[in-house]
Image (cartoon, rainbow, N blue to C red):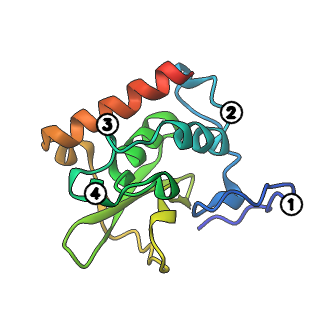
Amino acid sequence: MTSLKIDKNIKFQYKFYGHEYANIKPINKKYDKIKDLYDLYDVLNNIWSKETCAPRMRKDWNINNKTLGQCSITSFLVQDIFGGNVYGIKLDDGNFHCYNVINNLIFDLTKEQFNKPLNYDLKNQQFKEIHFKNEEKYQRYLLLKNKLENYL
């Protein structure tokens, strides 16, 4: 991955993977009110909800684990705003945990839901067309996107 200078002024509250390099700017003018990935993460923390969580995980979702079940819809929203690609880590249950690669840097805004290290190997690129064949997932994505646009 590309090496960048780490910003020493980063607030320590950011725990998402890649937070040290998250001062990248949006490429989608529709979201020009978002300054960078830190700003988006702050907004997402205000709008992630049980309704945007994957149904199979809703019983475990709570305010202290807001990123639970949010990975694919969040990753594709990040892609809409910042570009790049979405990749997935195959989990023990056969599902994929999605994350972003932007400008050759890895970002995982929903990493906090895991209590273990993850292997970001870039082997399993993910695509909206495949994920959103699942109507329920597509509707959650639209809900998150609408919540973001209303928040802005």
Of the two numbered discs 4 and 2 on the same chain, state the one appearing first in sequence: 2
Residue identified by numbered label 1: 8
Distance between the alpha carbons at the discs numbered 1 and 3: 34 Å
Q: Hey, which quadrant is residue 144 in on the image? A: top left
Q: Earlier in the sequence, mark 1 or mark 3?
A: 1
State the separation of the CA atoms marked 4 and 1: 38 Å
Give the foreground label among 1 and 3: 3
**x, y percentage for residue 3?**
70, 66
Q: Which residue is mark 2?
A: 35
Q: CA distance from mark 2 to mark 3?
A: 21 Å
Q: Amino acid at mark 1?
A: Lys
Q: Secondary structure at mark 2?
A: loop
Q: Earlier in the sequence, mark 2 or mark 3?
A: 2
Residue 113 location, x and y as percent? 45, 65
Q: CA distance from mark 2 to mark 1?
A: 18 Å
Query: In percent of the image, x 56 and y 32: which residue is there?
Result: 27
Nearest to viewer (mark 2 / mark 3): 3
Q: Viewer-nearest of labels 4 and 1?
A: 4
- Specify the label residue 141 is tagged with: 3
Q: Position of residue 121 (x, y in %)?
A: 42, 74
Please tell me which of labels 4 and 1 falls first in the chain: 1
